[in-house]
Image (cartoon, helix red, strand yellow):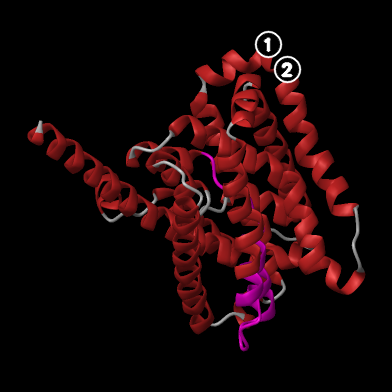
Amino acid sequence: MNRLLSRLNIDPYLLMLLSTVGIASIVPARGIWAGIAGGVADAAIALLFFLHGAKLSREAILDGARAWKLHLTVACLTFVIFPLLGLGIRAIPGLEPSLATGVLFLTLLPSTVQSSIAFTAIAGGNVAAAVCSASFSNLAGIFVTPVLTALFITGEAQGFSTDPIVSISLQLLLPFVAGHLLRPWIGGFVQRHKTLLGYTDRGSILLVVYTAFGAAVLEGLWQKVTLGELALIAVLSLALLAAIMVIGNLMGRLLGFSHEDRIVILFCGSKKSLATGVPLAGVLFPAAQVGAIILPLMFFHQIQLMVCAVLARRLAAQSEAERSGAEVSE
């Protein structure tokens, strides 16, 4: 089964996400169980950010600061160009309001870490720069995404509020900082047990998705969203990814980056993090709205993985062909 999914470029985790959505749609958490499930999900997310804090080394932060031009370009794509595209998409008439908000919200999120680095490595890009750029993007997203959300979404009707930033700081940033400060004592354990971080990462997202979709289903999510709207989200996700990749490639060439650094811009600048986006949505939006808001993010997440997997292998094949041609000519 894993071989078949790999050949089809389908992430097995997507099937787990879809199964979780199905379970939440049929058996949503109600009453006291909803409160218990929400508390467990919050604890799992805090543990996730604690472990990520312990994983990030001080050296990575210092090394990443030196490649400021590259990181600034990726940040521009992530937190400026992407949101502008999101605002344009939200203005399209006929899109269900909560889903339109979800599309805009996904454009405000930071880049992924693991997949950005992995695809950069496969394509023959600057892996060290990708590690720093993706890490900085995620760290910045803890601050930047709540501010952008308040400016473009939640603040439109009620004015700017610092409450989301305070909630993010207590629920996500504080565990992250605590983990980083404890890195001298627990960093080795975390590095030796990377599987633990992976299970925590994926398990916490599944918990949040279950509680979010369960609350949304109880509020009538599937009566509000049609199959046509879901198909539209898929089309918009493809268009959004294509646009940001074209823009990123043009920026990389115009700014004179090397081929290896342009690969970093391509893969780090075009991603949006499901692992960061789901917890942030749970903090920034009412529970009944989270399910609909993260739905576009789930679509975009899988589409970006499939497209980037194909693109990374194609770039790797091109690089190998160029190296072989150079050796023959010599």
Amino acid type, mark 1: Trp
Please identify the quadrant where the C terminus is shown. Answer: top left
Q: Residue at x 42, y 53 (%)?
A: 305
Q: Residue at x 80, y 33 (%)?
A: 174
User: Of 253 and 59, which appears nearest the observer?
Assistant: 253
* 58 inside magenta stretch: no
Left or right, 247 with reference to 313: right
Q: Quadrant of residue 66?
A: top right
| Residue 292 shows in this picture | no
Q: Residue at x 25, y 51 (%)?
A: 7
User: Of 256 and 36, which appears nearest the observer?
Assistant: 256
Residue 9, label in figure: none
Residue 185, label in figure: 1
* 109 inside magenta stretch: yes
Whether residues under marks 1 and 2 lie with C-beta atoms below 8 angstroms apart, the answer is yes
| Residue 149 shows in this picture | yes
Task: Please provide percent x and percent y for residue 253.
Answer: 44, 52
Q: Quadrant of residue 85?
A: bottom right
What span is in magenta?
86-113
Which element carries disc 1, helix, strand or loop? helix
Asked if 23 appears above or below 206 in the picture, the reply is: below
- Tell me the residue that label 2 is attached to: 182
Task: Please provide percent x and percent y for residue 136.
Answer: 64, 38
**How many residues crowd around disc 1 within 10 Å: few (fewer than 14), some, or many (20 or more)?**
few
Left or right, 5 with reference to 52: left
Task: Please provide percent x and percent y for residue 43.
Answer: 73, 38
User: Of 193 and 101, which appears nearest the observer?
Assistant: 101
| Callout count | 2
Task: In the displayed orientation, state which residue is furthest to the bottom.
Answer: 94
**How many residues crowd around disc 2 within 10 Å: few (fewer than 14), some, or many (20 or more)?**
some
Which element carries disc 2, helix, strand or loop? loop
Amino acid type, mark 2: Leu
